[in-house]
Image (spheres, grey):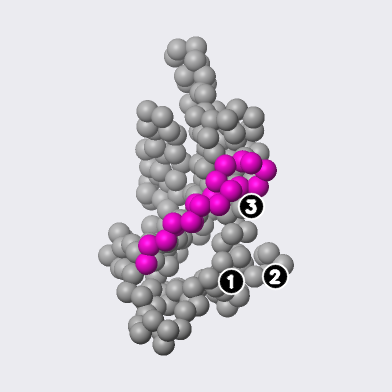
Amino acid sequence: MSSADGASLVQLQPDRLYVNWRKMEDSQEYPRFEAVRDRYLRIREQFNLFLKELSGDELSPAGYELTYTNPFLSANGWRSFADLPNFFKPWAWDKADFGSAPKSLRLNVEMELPGDCGKLVLNISPAIRKVTNEPAMRVDLTAQAEATVAARTSLAEWAETAHVAIVETFVKISTAEKLAEWGHWEEHGK
């Protein structure tokens, strides 16, 4: 089920309930974490009430997941993976050391979330923006928690912890120049 503009999407799968938001046009504003989280919680509660009415059962989370997907396009100053050091601090290579800049990159890094609340996965890969067929670099930050975490932590509490970890990780790996350009520099007091 999607919104009229296609930006919001609700997906119900046998073992998952997703609420997604995606930017369909350059003029669309990102709705911010709180709005997306609150929408998810409302939809989840409505679905839970429907289940109770239909079968007497309630949702029992098998885990939690929160993903931020950041596509970097030519409008953001990205043309190829040679531009990666302009975006992220850990990849400040010198072409002289390697003979050339990378043509492509796939990276997957896993870290623990604070408070034994699951894991955080950083994934960088090539992508294509479907709307314009433009090459892009895709950066996903995904927080995941298994059923044991879901059993002892409310979704709202966990989502806040995951959100903070995702934002802090993104800020820590990004260059000061890009953070200032994106407006994150002032937001995070750096």
Gap in Å between the C-alphas at discs 1 and 3? Answer: 16 Å
Gap in Å between the C-alphas at discs 2 and 3? Answer: 15 Å
Q: Position of residue 58 (x, y in %)?
A: 52, 19
On the picture, is 145 further left or further right than 26? right
Say whether residue 46 is visible.
no
What's drawn in magenta, residue-wise?
Answer: 105-123
Above/below status of 54 relative to 20: above
On the picture, is 182 further left or further right than 189? left
Identify which residue is drawn at 41% across, 87% down. 96
Give the residue type at disc 3: Val
Residue 100 painted magenta: no
Give the residue type at disc 2: Lys
Above/below status of 98 relative to 168: below
* Residue at the front extreme of this rendering: 97
- The residue nearer to you, when weighing 50 against 186, is 186
Mark 3 or mark 2, which is nearer the start of the sequence? 3
Q: Which residue is mark 3?
A: 164
Residue contact between numbered discs 1 and 2, judged by CB atoms under 8 Å = yes
Mark 3 or mark 1, which is nearer the start of the sequence? 3
Q: Which residue is mark 1?
A: 179
Identify which residue is drawn at 39% across, 33% down. 12
Above/below status of 150 relative to 133: above
